[in-house]
Structure formats: structure tokens, C-alpha cells
Amino acid sequence: MAGKWPSRYKTAKTMKKLSNMKRFKQVQSFIAVGSIVFVLFWSLPGFASSIDSKKYSRVIWNYLEALCAFGPRNPGSEGYRETLALIRKVGEKYADQVVEHPFSVRTSMSSSVDMVNLELRFQGTEGGAPILIGAHFDTRPFADEDANPEKWSEPILGANDGGSGTAVLLGLAQYISQHPVARPVHLVFFDGEDFGGKDSGLKLLGSTFYAQQLVQIEKEKWPYWVLVIDMIGDKDLQIFKETYSLKGSSSFLDKIYSVAKEQGAQSFKESVKYTIYDDHYPFHRMGIPSTVLIDFDYPHWHTLADTLDKVSIESMFSVFSVVAKTIEDL
């Protein structure tokens, strides 16, 4: 073994150089795509929003490019570790406090996986119970909805599923730091939303853990409202009202759709279409008003085709703008 070390070390260095070159080329291609997207975006009619659309669209898109350049973000992967580092860096720069919530998930009798929720806290100007805005940053470890069964064991990139919501939250961190709102805002990046197989029960792991920990504190400190953002980057974005959101947070849902109407965000549809078990559900079960904004008609869901070129900056900014304005008025 010792005799093989030098050659292995050299090979590792060579492979690392090749990997870095490949990643650099990926980033270059992402930037090229981003430039094309922005040319198209600025040629379209703008939103009736007071937010600097040019600035924050670029901020959000840059974050998404970075997330995609990291590669798949399934727990334990290099992309997963780099994503955590990015969230921590953004939190240290913009948030009043960064809180980590580590937990472990048993996957069998003899093994477990370590996970962590990252929370960026903003104090607010008037205090009160916090608004929790969440998104899962992890990606599916296997492309089990891909058209090619031979690809089912491969992890997805998750540009939209996981990436778009994470990028919007990172953009909100920067925006809220410069435009404080009355209530405290907690931006929570949930781990393990997409971890397990279809019948494993290993889903919504981070949000379930977070919700369970709330029983240890006074109800007055529970979230005033939970808003989850998931898969909001589809070029043909259509966000219908979701059943649990309507049952448990109808007044907040009405507020969101009122703001969307004011801003001319036509992707927000007034009708109810789906009942979805997403990261809002563990909070809904506890009686906390909880809402999910999601386009569940995304055609590349849980496939290897969920890549950056399928995502629209216009769609992402429309949700960013509606959310930013909504929390200003609460």
C-alpha cells in the first residue's frame, strides 16, 4: 500500500486539476446561459414592483449558477458540503444570527446519515413571533422519475427542485438585511426533504425535525407563519393554491395572491389543484399557519433533466418579489 502512495497521490492531483477545469467550464457555460436569460428577461414587460429587479434578479441567478456548479447536493456529496458552506457564508455576511440544527437519520439497523438545517435569523424592527420562510437545499439522491431506468440510481442536479427555492432564500437574506421588516424573519434551509425512496418514509426529514423541536419552547415563540418555497423556477410557472395551505393559512394565502395580483405576477393561479406533502406539512399538523408555493407540474421533476437551462429567472424573481412585499406588510 505504501509503495503505491506516490502514484496515487499524483493521480489524485491530476484528477483534481481535471475536475477543477471541468467545473470552471461548467461555470463558464452557466454564465453564458445566464447572459442569454438576462437579455430575454429585460426585453419582457417588468413587474409592478418597487424592488430593484435588475439587481436582485442578478443576485438570485448568481446563487443558482453557483449551486448548479457545485453539482448534486444529496447528503454526503461534495456539492452538499459546498452548499452548506455557501449558506453559512451568506448568513455570516447578512443575517443577525446563524443557527445550525444538526440531526441524524437512521437508514438501517446499522447505519445513519448526519444532516443539518441551517437557519438565518433577522431580528425585525418591532419584534413578535417570527415569520419562517423555508426551502430545502438537498437534492434527490436518485433520478427515479427519469425516462431511462438505467439512470434511476444517479443523483439529480436539482436546478429547480431544491435549487430555485434555495437561491430565492439566499437572495432574500441579502434583501432583508438592507430592507428590514417589522417581524423577525427566520430563513430556514431544510435538509433531507428529498432523501428517501418512494415508500421509505424518509422524506421531509429536516422540516419534521425542526417542527418537533418547537415543542420544547413556548408557543408564543413558535412561527407566526410558515412559508415554504419549492420548485418555483419553471419557465412555464403556474402556482396553484394547495389544499393544506388553504385549510390552515387562508388569510396568508389571500395576502400572497393579492400582492401577486398587484404586481402582475400571472403565474399565481387562484384555483386549487393539489394536496402536497412538502416541508410546510409538519408545521400544518401542529396547527401553525403554513403555506407552500410550488409548481408541481414541472416536467423534469426527479429526473436528470432538471438542469439550469430549464429554469427561468423571470419566474424566480416573480416569487422573490411577491414574498418580499408580502412579509413587509405583516
Image (tube, helix red, strand yellow):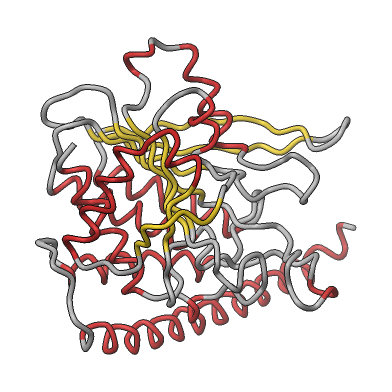
Q: Is residue 30 left or right of residue 327?
A: right
Measuring from the top left, give residue 129's x and y in whole percent. 27, 23
Which residue is rendered at x = 29% and y = 88% of the image?
40
User: Would you identify the image quadrant in which residue 161 lies?
Assistant: bottom right
**Does 126 sit above or below residue 256?**
above
Q: How many marks?
A: 0
Query: Quarter of the image containing the N terminus?
Result: bottom right
Residue in view at x 49 percent, y 14 percent: 215
Residue 258 position in % (x across, y down): 22, 52
Residue appearing at x 42%, y 61% in the figure: 239
Image height of 166 relative to 116, above or below: below
Q: Residue at x 40, y 45 (%)?
A: 88
Nearest the eye: 294 or 123: 294
Quadrant where the image shows the C terminus: top left
14 or 138, nearer to the observer? 138
**Image x and y of residue 23, in percent:** 53, 76
Q: Quadrant of residue 66?
A: bottom left
Above or below, comparing residue 270 to residue 312 in the picture: above
The answer to whether 228 appears left or right of 139 in the picture is left
Q: Nearer the viewer, residue 289 or 234?
A: 289
Give the x, y percent position of residue 259.
20, 54
